[in-house]
Image: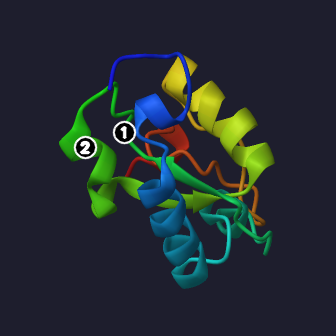
Amino acid sequence: MTNRDNAASRGYDARWRKYRSMFLREHPLCVLCSQIGGGTAATVVDHIQPHRGDYDLFWDPTNHQALCKPCHDGAKKSQEMTGRLRGCDVQGNPVDPAHHWRRK
């Protein structure tokens, strides 16, 4: 699964589409939007830890989370690049669990 030519060659085939539909039925809301008090419908099954071609990690259900497309393409991508999750919850607290304001 290291080929970047097309989605199917990277594992996003009919089996993945079936799994994705089932996962989004069971997890209909974006987890990042929910952390900030929103209720946006999830449209993407995200790999919490990037699988980078690891087939076992690709299919590990504990490594999946439901996200809306804006969170997947924005906040999650930024988190993968910087190591920090942007944003605050409705009380103004950072949503990143590693943020220094959240340390006890």
Please, which residue is most extreme toward the left here? 56
Callout 2, which amino acid?
A: Leu
* SS label for mark 2: helix
- Horizontally, residue 44 falls left or right of residue 90, namely left
* CA distance for labels 1 and 2: 8 Å
Callout 1, which amino acid?
A: Gln
- Horizontally, residue 80 falls left or right of residue 60, namely right
Residue 33, located in which quarter of the rendered image? bottom right
Q: Is residue 67 above or below residue 9?
A: below
Residue at the image point whose x is 34% and y is 18% from the top: 2
Residue 51 visible (yes or no): yes
* SS label for mark 1: loop
Could you say which is closer to the camera, residue 2 or residue 32? 2
Total number of numbered labels?
2
Residue at the image point whose x is 49% and y is 43% from the top: 12
Residue 9, located in which quarter of the rendered image? top left
Identify the residue position indicated by label 2 in the image: 57
Residue 86 visible (yes or no): no
Instruction: Give the image's coloring scheme.
Output: rainbow
Identify the residue position indicated by label 1 in the image: 49
- Horizontally, residue 10 falls left or right of residue 71, namely left
The location of residue 55, given as percent across then percent down, is 24, 39
The location of residue 53, given as percent across then percent down, is 31, 27
The location of residue 39, given as percent across then percent down, is 78, 75
Q: Is residue 66 above or below residue 22?
A: above
Could you say which is closer to the camera, residue 29 or residue 79? 29
Q: In this view, does 29 lie above or below 100?
A: below
Quarter of the image where the N terminus is located = top left
Residue 54, located in which quarter of the rendered image? top left
Residue at the image point whose x is 63% and y is 48% from the top: 94
Check contact, mark 1 vs mark 2: CB within 8 A.
yes
Instruction: Specify which label sits upstream in the sequence, 1 or 2.
Output: 1
